[in-house]
Image (cartoon, helix red, strand yellow):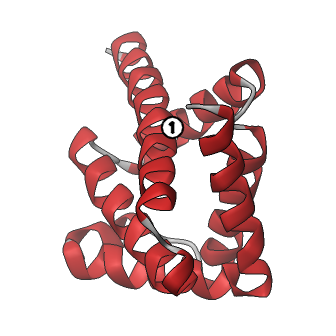
Amino acid sequence: MTPEQLALVQASYASLGDERTETTREFYRRLFAADPTVEAMFSTDPEVQTEKFTSELAAIVEAIGSFDEVSPRLGDLAARHVDYGVLTRHYRLVGEALLGALAAALGPAWDEATEAAWRLAYNLVAEVMMSAAAEVSRSAG
């Protein structure tokens, strides 16, 4: 990611302000609509899960510019997701649901550059997580 793309992701997420929680709710609506079987993976109260996701996303967005800082966090997150039953195919669903929710929340501010920056950021995060998840699975097997 270029510094400009990183700044665009961080600024656009910051611009959501109090709408971050509603954006997360929209993310879950989109995710469960895309694949209703995913909802069974969530045993936590929906509002608690919404708070956790919102907090985790904010932390990742903040740290994404420093691979040394974000990589261990993503590795831990990936290990937990393996325990929840998350499969490689779920990462695409999550990405599309997240980008769709962000596009809806940002409205006219969601332009080609913003979408490209977010898509790149999400793909980076997903790649690190899928790699860590594969390592966890190999170690367990």
Q: Can you give x and y, in whole percent of width and height, for residue 6 in the image?
A: 66, 42
Task: Name the residue beneath numbered marker 1.
Answer: 125
Residue 93, image quadrant: bottom left
Q: Nearer the viewer, residue 135 or 125?
A: 125
Q: Considering only vertical position in the picture, is 9 above or below 110?
A: above
Q: Considering only vertical position in the picture, is 37 above or below 90?
A: below
Q: Nearer the viewer, residue 42 or 100?
A: 100
| Number of numbered discs visible in the structure rendering | 1
Q: Is residue 81 visible?
A: yes
Q: Considering only vertical position in the picture, is 67 above or below 122?
A: above
Residue for point 27% across, 51% down? 92
Asked whether, in this view, residue 42 is left or right of residue 46, the answer is: left
In the rendered view of the protein, which quadrant contains the C terminus? top left
Residue for point 47% across, 56% down? 113
Q: Can you give x and y, in whole percent of width and height, for residue 122 in the image?
A: 47, 46
Residue type pointed to by label 1: Val
Residue for point 72% across, 32% down? 65
Q: Is residue 46 visible?
A: no
In the rendered view of the protein, which quadrant contains the N terminus? top right
Asked whether, in this view, residue 25 is left or right of residue 48, the answer is: left
Residue 57, image quadrant: bottom right
